[in-house]
Image (cartoon, rainbow, N blue to C red):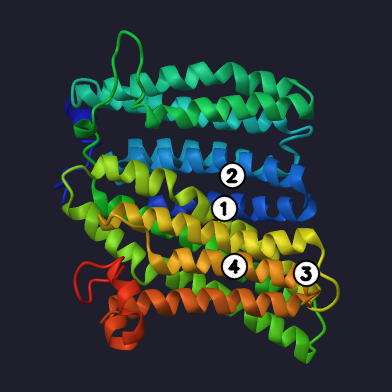
Amino acid sequence: MTIRANLFRIRDAHGHAPVTNIELFFDLVFVFAITQLSHGLLEHLGWLGALQTLMLLFAVWWVWIFTTWAANWLDPERANVRLMLFALMLAGLALSSSIPQAFGKSGWLFAAAYCSMQIGRSLYMIWASQGVHPARARNFTRIIIWSVFSLPFWIGGALADPGQRMLLWAAALAIDYAGPATFFRVPGLGRSDAGSWDISGAHMAERCALFIIIALGEGVLITGATFATTPQSPLHWLAFATCFLGSAALWWLYFDTGARRGSQAMETTEAAGLLARYAYTYWHIPIVAGLVVSAVADEMLLAHPKGHIEFPMLAVSIGGPLLFLVGNMGFKHATSGRSLPPVSHMIGAAALLGVGAAAWFGQWQPIALGIATFAVLVFTAIWEWGSYHGGWRRWAPWLGRLERTGQRDYGQGE
């Protein structure tokens, strides 16, 4: 029992357990995974390619977030835990390398890597928790049962043709994603209770923020790498600046208020596990998806800043920021305790749809679409910033009536 007890961190649930170097090293695998996803979407830019990329993103996110939950309890400074994370990294590298052909010849590798990571991690947590945290051991026993239930769909999909594979893997993902939503209810074992998920809230918030940095970094890397291969014309320079500043605006929208307030909420709440399930486990999915799609839009804009806008380009140019704003709305609403999502983000989402319609029917140039999309993101960020720094009754008194519908106290923000 002493050896197993030493595998866990000793900390206050409301305190902060710093992110360790081994956790950052583990994330390097997912830098590669995000790159593979964005490149795959660019090469198969259509409804089918988008759906396949979304399914693969769901799987990649699920193995990462489940590992983050586990590492929240474990002490990564222990050799035993480090070896477990190294094993997960090896499987994760195989998972990432199989992404381009996951719906082709590498389907078996993707399914095998995913299932081995999910089941292997849970088996380790059961072993580590036995006699130390009985409730946690029961929780991971339930998780194992849910993983075993989805296992035939993963295996069957890997052996089926690409069309059937999508249906079988969609069923497997539906099972896996339903687990936390139902508290991993299992006949005879009952369900998990929120009190047994006693995580370090600040650690969870920091880990997810770092994953957002990974996804943002993919956009920056694509911007730099693509610009290096384009003609150094004024138009390409303008597209280059637009893409980078767009990434900066996305960073601002997440980190200026959302990440900080989310971390504070996780530190002070008595139900950090429940809040983490909604705000971080689920609502961060559209945020990450939006960043992956935005990276594809940046590469297309840099390659073709002028000419006719085809529908795939319009879809990624508007869809990326729109997914990001929707995810941020859910995340910020979950961590703010307010009755309404941020008004700024609702207006921004509507404005993005308006820009998309105007670009399509007005036959805009791609650079005009990129600049307009960036302008909407800046407008949304300024609206939110103004709300948190004195409110619109200070900065725009004529909008005071609208501002009062989403803000209780002066200066508190949306």
Q: 200 or 302: nearer the eye?
A: 302
Amino acid type indicated by mark 3: Phe
Which residue is located at x 64 percent, y 56 percent?
35
Residue 288 vs 250, above or below: the answer is above
Q: Which residue is mark 1?
A: 289
Q: Is residue 204 left or right of residue 347?
A: left
Amino acid type indicated by mark 2: Leu
Q: CA distance from mark 3 to mark 2?
A: 32 Å
Q: Nearer the viewer, mark 4 or mark 2?
A: 4
Q: Which residue is mark 3?
A: 361
Report the disc number at residue 352.
Answer: 4
Q: How many marks?
A: 4
Amino acid type indicated by mark 1: Ala
Q: Is residue 196 left or right of residue 364?
A: left
- Would residue 21 be seen by someone viewing this image from the given angle? no
Q: Earlier in the sequence, mark 1 or mark 3?
A: 1
Q: Position of residue 247 (x, y in %)?
A: 55, 72
Q: CA distance from mark 1 to mark 4?
A: 17 Å
Q: Position of residue 210 (x, y in %)?
A: 42, 59
Q: Which residue is mark 2?
A: 57
| Residue 60, picture quadrant | top right
| Disc 1 secondary structure class | helix
Amino acid type indicated by mark 4: Leu
Quarter occupied by the C terminus: bottom left
- Would residue 218 be seen by someone viewing this image from the given angle? yes
